[in-house]
């Protein structure tokens, strides 16, 4: 039983922050007190400015609602460390979040205990992220937050979606999961109009609008959202087709390229095929360069043309200055 009032209040607040809704009985069992004591403690939190709402139902319950101001959050050691690292990462990867992420990080680091501040500082000083520039579009933070909340609250969402062919159309979906891969964010949702599961790239979504209509979540095919999205990304038609036969073991190629397992198919112990198809021509070139082995290429004409042009630029860049066409070595 948590008899110390301040400790019990902190424990109650922490519980309210971990779940959307608690029944009074559940909170009483967690705190080792009566439901009457829980009601009194809830009233104390309200007096302190925490917007705790009562919910209706068989036994009634409580939830921490949004208020006019952000109340203090309680984080354990691992949560505080993860939040600090995530804020540092967001500062470099979410459009419009650089300054706000750093401000939030500064506030968090100011109140971190010494042991955690040392841990966070070590993580920041000894880790780095590689920015591949134009490999994938940066995600708008407001859009990401809107979709994430709709997923969490099981709220039907409408938005305009632009396909890879450039056509746009309205969508009405039941959002289930967000999945990130290769610098891109994907929404796994059930399209109510088509009555089918669909995957949407977040950078192609515009004007997202929650409808306030709640839905009962459906079981995701295969019970693994990330695996389902990965499989569909592999089989989805890309704008530019490119398949190579590589004279190297499949496992070696997977390690070198970081390709999804379903894109690499072994032919024998010393060769395999790799599907390098992509919407982005430089991405295909990067995968081919990472092979570091002999290969034959079967690709669309625009892929061949791009690679030939890239090879010409590379050859020009590596040719000795005195042997370049139109170049004359100055006399000594």
Image (spheres, rainbow, N blue to C red):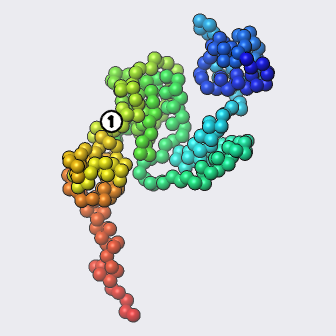
The residue shown at (79%, 25%) is: 6
Q: Is residue 54 visible?
A: no
Q: Which residue is mark 1?
A: 231
Between 199 and 297, the one lying in front of the other is 297
Which image quadrant for residue 112?
top right
> Residue at the front extreme?
269
Whether residue 33 is situated above or below residue 185 in the rendered picture: above
- Quadrant placement of the N terminus: top right
Q: Position of residue 205 (x, y in %)?
A: 43, 36
The residue shown at (68%, 14%) is: 28
- Quadrant placement of the C terminus: bottom left
Whether residue 170 is situated above or below residue 58 in the rendered picture: below
The residue shown at (56%, 45%) is: 90
Left/right of residue 227 with respect to residue 212 in the rendered view = left
Element carrying mark 1: helix
The residue shown at (36%, 50%) is: 255
Whether residue 251 is situated above or below residue 14 in the rendered picture: below
Please tell me how crowded label 1 is: few (under 14), some (14-19), or many (20+) other residues with Cα within 10 Å.
Answer: some
Q: Position of residue 280 (x, y in %)?
A: 34, 50
Q: Position of residue 146 (x, y in %)?
A: 53, 32
Left/right of residue 91 with respect to residue 313 in the rendered view = right
> Residue at the top extreme?
58
């Amino acid at each position: 039983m948590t008899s110390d009032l301040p400790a019990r209040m902190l424990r109650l607040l922490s519980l309210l922050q971990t779940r959307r809704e608690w029944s009074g009985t559940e909170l009483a069992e967690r705190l080792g007190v009566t439901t009457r004591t829980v009601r009194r403690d809830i009233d104390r939190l309200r007096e302190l400015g925490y917007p705790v709402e009562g919910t209706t139902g068989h036994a009634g319950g409580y939830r921490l609602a949004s208020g006019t101001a952000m109340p203090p959050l309680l984080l354990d050691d691992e949560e505080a460390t993860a939040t600090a690292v995530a804020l540092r990462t967001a500062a470099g990867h979410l459009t419009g979040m650089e300054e706000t992420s750093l401000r939030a990080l500064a506030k968090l680091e100011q109140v971190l205990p010494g042991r955690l501040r040392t841990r966070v500082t070590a993580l920041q000083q000894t880790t780095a992220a590689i920015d591949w520039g134009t490999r994938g579009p940066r995600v708008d933070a407001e859009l990401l937050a809107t979709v994430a909340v709709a997923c969490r609250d099981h709220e039907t969402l409408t938005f305009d979606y632009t396909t890879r062919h450039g056509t746009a159309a309205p969508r009405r979906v039941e959002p289930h999961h967000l999945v990130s891969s290769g610098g891109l964010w994907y929404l796994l949702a059930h399209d109510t109009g088509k009555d089918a599961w669909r995957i949407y790239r977040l950078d192609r979504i515009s004007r997202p609008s929650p409808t306030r209509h709640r839905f009962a979540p459906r079981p995701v095919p295969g019970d693994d959202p990330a695996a389902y999205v990965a499989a569909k990304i592999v089989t989805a038609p890309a704008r530019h087709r490119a398949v190579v036969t590589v004279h190297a073991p499949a496992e070696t190629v997977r390690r070198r390229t970081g390709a999804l397992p379903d894109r690499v198919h072994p032919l024998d112990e010393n060769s395999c095929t790799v599907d390098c198809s992509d919407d982005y021509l430089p991405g295909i070139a990067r995968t081919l360069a990472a092979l570091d082995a002999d290969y034959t290429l079967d690709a669309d004409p625009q892929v061949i043309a791009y690679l030939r042009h890239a090879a010409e630029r590379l050859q020009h860049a590596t040719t000795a200055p005195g042997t370049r066409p139109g170049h004359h070595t100055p006399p000594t």
